[in-house]
Image (cartoon, rainbow, N blue to C red):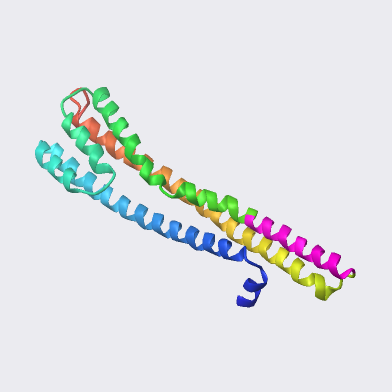
Amino acid sequence: MLEIFQKGGPLMYPILFCSVLALAIFLERIWVYRGLIKQSTRLRDEVELLVRNEHIADALAICRERRTILAPIYVVALNAAGRSRDQIKTLVEEVGERYSVTLDRYLGLLGTIATITPLLGLLGTVLGMIRAFTQLAVQGVGTPATLGGGISEALITTATGLSVAIPTILLHKYLTSRSDNIAHQLEIHALDLVDLLAHDSKRS
């Protein structure tokens, strides 16, 4: 593998860097999403129990201590307790839009990696072919020995770029879907609390 990597030329290094960065982003996002789901579910259960027992101040105190996206959304809703459902919902949606963008952190970079890695491979192809034809022009006669290095470099960088880009695209699609699902879950949690706090909603 090391020999193949070295034959691929200098563009193998940025492609390798992109692959490592893409994997790091994927693992970081998975870790964050998993923790966020657990924290949000726990916070929802605690806050809804307190609100049902009319302990709004205690629910506020808990939300202000927690480090999760749902906490500031709940704080706004709890501070608006007793207002109409539409009023609380509007406040919750405004705050939710600001904080939900953190779910997509680094996903843009991951998409960029998926875009540029095949381009780096293509650039490697062009440089390899330039090298091969330059040797052909200098030596006058092309042989497998003289042309093989440039052509090999071209093929290796192209294959490597695609090998990084294809799984990165799949990871990006998966994380985007996961982010959308979590945002939907958080929206449901927030609206459930809105129904509990609004004076014109039916309480269960």
Q: Residue at the far front: name it.
A: 138
Q: Position of residue 190 (x, y in %)?
A: 28, 37
**In the displayed structure, would residue 19 be above or below residue 58?**
below
**What's the residue at 10%, 42% (across, down)?**
58
Q: Position of residue 172 (x, y in %)?
A: 50, 51
Residues 83 and 51: in front is: 83
Using the rendered image of the protein, determine whether residue 136 is visible from the camera's viewpoint.
yes
**In the displayed structure, would residue 24 be above or below residue 95?**
below
Position of residue 113 in the picture relative to residue 150 (left or right) = left
Q: Residue at the far right: name it.
A: 141
Using the rendered image of the protein, determine whether residue 204 is visible from the camera's viewpoint.
no
Name the image quarter holding residue 32: bottom left
Q: Main secondary structure of the magenta part?
A: helix
**What's the residue at 67%, 72% (across, down)?**
7
Position of residue 62 in the picture relative to residue 20 (left or right) = left
**What's the residue at 18%, 46% (across, down)?**
46
